[in-house]
Image: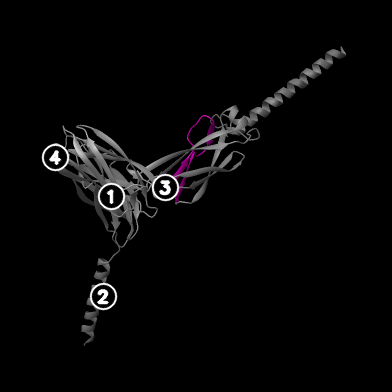
Amino acid sequence: MTMKNYIFLMSVIATLLIIFQISMAAEPIVQASFSVNPSVSSPGTDGYIQVTLKNAGTAVANSVKVTLTSTDIGINVDPYRWVDIGGLGIGESSSTLFKFSVPKTTSPGLYRINFEIDYCQDSSCREINQFTIVSVQSQPILELKSIKPDRLNIGSNTTLTFTVANNGNSEITNVVITWQESNNLILPLGLSNRIVLSSIAANQQLDIPVEVVTSPTITPGVYPISVKMEYFDKTGTKQNSTSVVGLIVGGTTEFSVDVQEFTGNTLTLSIANIGVNPATSVAIKIPRQERFSVIGSSSVFLGNLNPGDYTIASFQVFPRTNETRMGGGSLIVEISYTDTSGARQVAQKEVSISLIFGELQFPTRQRQGGGLLQSTFIQYLLIGIIIIVAVVVFFKLRKRKKK
């Protein structure tokens, strides 16, 4: 091989390597999948759409946001139509929920709900548009109206209320209702999953309590509950229907707030997650209230708190009433956080403050530019004037006595 051919071959190889490296440049690729619960809705019922985003690319996706842009006529959605996911690392996934309702006047059919997913890499942003379908079918004679509450805590007992209704104009008999979660992570407590009713009158609605327990190993998310209903109509014909209802597992958590230290006017609070669910984007705030006031910032961002974690936050707290100054009182604090279902929650706690405030320093009302220094200067000035007046009066009285 001549030197000229060798140089040409190496140039071709170098060019191919450059093209390959460019083609393999790191970039985020956000993929979306949808899950509709229940899979089939009836007019007059509610449901959830779970949107799961996964970064299948080779770089971090920033500023990820999901927006519900439009729906077909016949499906209503909550006013809260967008969710800010934040960042998605390589291979990471994140899920969020959108609630929808089917009006009673909606006709059976397939209804489209459109979503827009936005994400960025540095200053370059991308937008993808996808949709999911909500299937609506006519109501059966025996209808499962709802299961409430629709949120369960991990490893906890909950009394669910199954609301069923006979929408027909005649009595139905020998009603058998069975329900099941496919992975047996949500189970009936102490009873079977079979409910037997002798009859339901025409146009009658019943609330049936069912105590359930969720597994302590269950993963937060939306779990479909399949409910099968069998009954005999007025002709003696056996009828049946099946419904699927989505229950959210995870949700809220429990916090403990205690006084760790009170030095001067600096109050240090200890905040602990004593629940079984993690909490993200936790913030604590002392709202405006009757007994106490806060000088400076009234809120502190704490970050994420897993079960068993705790952290501290400090505030400059002052009593607002004489009663509080002498004996303390209850301080109200608010904890806001995002639960495992993606919803923002606010928990309010009362903290007992029992210190004697007589030895503490309290702020006085300030005029612009004056501050506490100006208030102190005025106090000393008044004391000086009083001393001068007293001296003058003393010498005048002494002079009169001499005369």
- Sequence-wise first label, 2 or 4: 2
Q: Mark 1 = which residue?
A: 180
Q: Residues within 10 Å of mark 4 (few under 14, many from 20)?
A: few
Span highlighted in magenta in the image:
282-305
Report x, y in % for residue 241. 18, 44
Q: Mark 2 = which residue?
A: 14
Q: Residues within 10 Å of mark 2 (few under 14, many from 20)?
A: few
Q: Note whether residue 178 is visible.
A: yes
Q: Residue furthest top?
A: 403
Instruction: Write the residue at 24% across / 51% down.
Output: 34
Q: Residues within 10 Å of mark 1 (few under 14, many from 20)?
A: some
Measured Cα–Cα span from mark 3 to mark 4? 58 Å
Picture disc at residue 236: 4
Measured Cα–Cα span from mark 3 to mark 1? 34 Å
Nearer mark to the viewer, of 2 and 4: 4
Q: Secondary structure at mark 1?
A: strand
Q: Secondary structure at mark 3?
A: strand
Q: Mark 3 = which residue?
A: 281
Instruction: Write the residue at 19% across / 37% down.
Output: 172
The question of residue 291 being in magenta is answered with yes
Measured Cα–Cα span from mark 3 to mark 2? 49 Å
- Sequence-wise first label, 2 or 1: 2
Q: How is the image coloured?
A: one colour
Q: Residue furthest bottom?
A: 1
Q: Residues within 10 Å of mark 3 (few under 14, many from 20)?
A: some
Amino acid type, callout 2: Ala
The question of residue 348 being in magenta is answered with no
Instruction: Write the residue at 25% across / 44% down.
Output: 177
- Sequence-wise first label, 3 or 2: 2
